[in-house]
Amino acid sequence: MSTLAASAPNILPHHIAIIMDGNNRYGKAHNLGKGQGHVAGKDALDPIVEYCVDAGIEVLTVFAFSSENWQRPPSEVALLMRLLTSTIHEQMPRMYEYRIRLRFIGDRSQLSSDLQTLMADAEEKTAEFEAMTLVIAISYGGQWDIAHAAKQLAQQVQSGDLCAEDIDKEKLGKYVQLADAPAVDMLIRTGGEYRISNFLLWQSAYAELFFTKTLWPNFSAAELSEMVVEFAQRQRRFGKTSEQIVGDHVSK
């Protein structure tokens, strides 16, 4: 176990989600070729994954390509698709070494058949690994996710298998992406922007938010470790008062 992971607090987030922002700005700041900031960002993921599995984080979800990113210049989209493909290939040995389950969320219908096959194969080969789950969001948007879940419920109502009056947040929550995973309790955005950009809207309803000016290629396990320590110090009330939370801890 790394020194950073060994010093992790007793209270840990179950599910960390990261918006990996700042690749293009990193490339411009370092006079890199067009799109090379994304190449640099690809390598930043490895130490973050290693820290999370060593510290005991259950799920790490990273935002690799949003549903809105399809609007970017075709050359940049093509580069990102190639990087996603190479990232999956490069991550597989790490998945085997650390026994990490690899999953993907998003609208796969817009992806190439080759990439879809690669994703499905990676998921199948790592399905039984239990050390941690690494989720890569590709062609994903939180609004699409909720709409997709609502559509599935609407189809059940149309077929007569479900009454509209019976639909509640629990039923809808069963059809969003990662319904079987812990809710996001720690959401990080790198790159200095202060928004969540349509990422895991349903799953992050009560997430603690962390924003850093650090550009993603420069984001380190050390900075993540500092955030995890801060997370442990925050009081999460979920609608209750501070006094109720203290009382709950005393009763336990």
Image (spheres, helix red, strand yellow):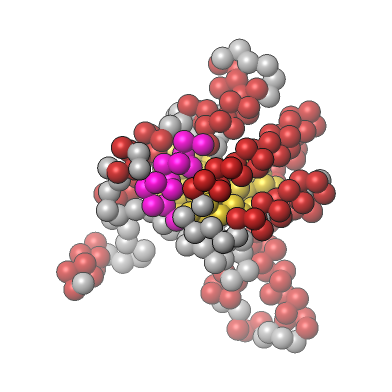
The correct choice, above or below, for 117 with respect to 162 in the image is above
- Residue 252 position within the rendered picture, expressed as x and y whole percent measured from the top left: 21, 72
Q: Residue at x 77, y 81 (%)?
A: 158
Q: Residue at x 51, y 36 (%)?
A: 46
Which sits in the foreground, 172 or 222? 222
The correct choice, above or below, for 207 with respect to 250 in the image is above
Quadrant containing the N terminus is: top left
The correct choice, above or below, for 150 with respect to 35 in the image is below
The correct choice, above or below, for 104 with respect to 151 in the image is above
Q: Is residue 51 magenta?
A: yes
Q: Residue at x 71, y 71 (%)?
A: 152
Which sits in the foreground, 239 or 223? 223
Which sits in the foreground, 142 or 59? 59
- Residue 22 position within the rendered picture, expressed as x and y whole percent measured from the top left: 55, 29
Quadrant in the picture for residue 80: top right
Magenta residues span 46-58
Q: Residue at x 55, y 16 (%)?
A: 29
Report the predominant secondary structure element of the magenta stretch.
helix
Quadrant in the picture for residue 202: bottom right
Most extreme residue toward the right is 113
- Residue 107 position within the rendered picture, expressed as x and y whole percent measured from the top left: 72, 54
- Residue 115 position within the rendered picture, expressed as x and y whole percent measured from the top left: 76, 46
Q: How many marks?
A: 0
Q: Is residue 178 magenta?
A: no
